[in-house]
Amino acid sequence: MELPVLVKVKLAGLTKSDAAVPGLVKLLEDSDKYVRRGAEKALGEIRSKTAVPGLIKLLEDSDYLVRYSAEKALGEIGSETAIPELIKLLENSDSGVHSAAEALGEIGSETAIPELIKLLENSDSGVRHSAAEALGKIGSETAIPELIKLLENSDSGVRETVENTLGKIGSETVIFELTKLLEHSNTDLRKTAAYLIEIIGSKSVNSKSIKHSEYRDYDYDDYKMSCIYSQDEIDPKSAIRSLIIFLKYKCFSSIFSSSIADALAELIDSEIAIHGPIKPLEHPEDIEYPEEIEYIDIISGVINDLSKIGSELAIEVLIKILILNKYDTDLLFTVADASQKIVSEAAITSLNKVMIPIFIELLEDEDTDPDIYYRAVDILLDIDSPSVIPGLIQLLKSSDHHVRSDAAYALDCLGSENTIIELNKKLQSDSFFKASIDEIINIINSIQQRLQYYKPTPKIPMSNTLSHNYALLIGIGNCKDSDLSLPVTVKDVQAIKSFLTNPDLCGYINNQNHLRLLCNEQATKQNILDNLNWLQQQAKNDSKATILVYYSGHGWLDNSTQNYYLIPHDTTARNRKVTASTALPATEFNSALQQISAQKLLVIIDSCHAQGMATAKETEELELPENFSQTALPKNLIDELRKGTGRAVFTSSTGEEKSYYQEEMSIYTQHFLEALNGGGNKPGDKEVKVSNLMNYVGKTVPESAGKLGGKQTPIFDFSQVDDFPVALLCGGKGLPDGGWEEVKSEVRENIRAGRDVYNAGGDNTSQINVFGSSETTITIGDISSK
């Protein structure tokens, strides 16, 4: 089975093989932004430096998400070649500066430090955070002097970011520089220095130097320091003390509800009972928070303290805070970060039950900021727990492609054997998943590949209304030049339309938005091209489109030029010449078909109608223009259609052959209609696929031609392409237990077929060609293959 490009890309990333790199690098130039983005992710996972030049080019891509993925991949690869371009991005005003800073942090080069330090004073807190994270990861002491200076910045947000960064670097040099501030005239600065020294806890700093500050034992008022990220080593007693300080803050009721305050008081009593008494504050009534302290600073401190305590009661309080503030994204991300410090699996499970649905809701909101959105996706991936999978599966029904794509990616990474089982259930039962069928199948294939766990991929169901199916039926019929008229072709396409649009049979929607019929005067060259353009637009607007094109009319080959023409209504052959302006060159027809972006396209060309099928001159041989002969679509033109994917092309004949027909329609059309009604299906089948049509037409057309004394051998030019449904079977109810034999008589009675044979100058052969990447030709009848 030929997997979709995006699935191949994801699998390439999972293999982490350098052999996949050249192909992925080529896909960085693909016109589809989703393919480019997928290739970037895969290259980031493989971490081959060969991909760096291609990724650098995408830093200026017009699509934000492509730029974001390029920056992230460069960070994962860690090549210093990308540093100059990433530094340039730090000067931009768009949100790409976040990921550029993160990428520089991952690469870890000191070259970026001056530019990252500048970002610490940026007005955007997210930019400051990214810069601080990057500097912390680089961990260079080169940045320390400039960071120390920024501790005096007037913006509390800048100061807090710098504090976090110094805490991350955590070297003895930081301690040495901070001790200089212990005698500073600014009280807040002294408190900050003392706290950071306490946190970093370097053995090279003696306790005497710390005692210069009266704020050594946490009983200082700048509570926001308790949320510094490097605080991981604080024991439960320290966290309890921080909560006590918080409750002493006179305006706490404006931050949390009384129920939260009561819960915190209960928690403190419980923890004191477990860990013993906490050293009381000497002057708790003197504790005051600076006026400029931000709400999120205080609340972050409480959240971090609760996560460090980590008891069942502490997590209950944390959950209450989360529920009451679930629309506060800053708080939500703080809880997510803090949850990584929780040791108890039971506590994490309880928290995830509340936290995961909130994140899912955030992703479903169309107004969510892109930075928040993708940070939420990353957090869901970081959770790395089976508990997140049901929520991700729910996201597959989203109307937003980005949401579905990211949910699919997360499921690819986290999915287990049970995920496959759940996805199979959704395929069989949940109607709202019909729009996401391909994505679900891709996820299943990807998980199976990763786990080396294989079960048959479920059949793709179809709904009773084929809202994603479109058809263009062309029957040339009466021509402007009466000698060329083919009335039987109109009967062919009208019969096909009646079967396709019958809700109890094939289930196509019978309106101009889904099915169009061109016959007689309407079947002109321009109308044919215009309606192929209509199909292009339908496919562009509907990524799930399945498209059928049926042409029934003359096909002529100019032997002098080897150009092939389809002959529309307005073509004339007067004076044995073809008017170029009205005949439709097959190359032009093929070009229009190739512009149809549908991944499921079936084209049927019945173009070898000879004079016997024209009622205007039934007993006379049609005199063709000089150097022209009547043939089926040549193989070189069929090969042109290989350039598409997911395409099947049926032609009714090869070469200069006899063409067999009936009073009502051609033999080919009759057996095609029988196939649409289950001729090639098994009992219980609910849809007709390309393979069902191929198998049945390939068997019955030669048999019918043989009974009439002729030869007509269908040839299948078959390549690796996914088999896809073309129509419902029995309106989606499925073929009865008795199979085709049970319904055959009724179907044939409806078709009302009669047979006559007219000389077409050769042996008529039907071809069915499915295009992909490899060539395989199978002949049904004499069973030859090449």
Image: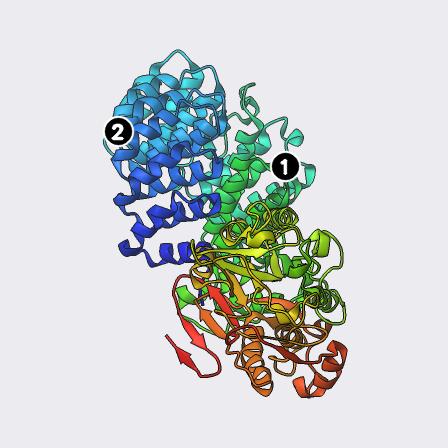
Quarter of the figure with the C terminus = bottom left
Q: Quadrant of the N terminus?
A: bottom left
In the visual, does 443 lie left or right of 11?
Answer: right
Residue 588, percent from left and from top: 52, 49
Q: Crowding near pointer 1: few (<14 within 10 Å), some, many (20+)?
A: few
Residue 276 visible in the picture = no
Percent from the top left, x then y, of residue 462? 65, 66
Number of labels in the image equals 2
State the SS at label 1. Answer: loop
Quarter of the image for residue 176 reads top left
Residue 328 in percent (x, y) is at 61, 36
Q: CA distance from mark 2 to mark 1?
A: 37 Å
Residue under label 1: 367
Q: Which quadrant would residue 263 be assigned to in this image? A: top right
Query: Is 246 or 705 nearer to us in this picture?
Result: 705
Which residue is painted at 42% across and 72% down in the image? 777
Q: Nearer the viewer, mark 2 or mark 1?
A: 1
Q: Is residue 122 left or right of residue 478?
A: left
- Type of residue at label 1? Asp
Q: Earlier in the sequence, mark 2 or mark 1?
A: 2
Asked whether the viewer can see residue 559, the reply is yes
Q: Which residue is the site of mark 2?
A: 110
From the viewer's perspective, is residue 139 above or below residue 726?
above
Tell me which amino acid carries mark 2: Glu
Colour scheme in the image? rainbow
Q: Viewer-proximal residue, 251 or 522?
A: 522
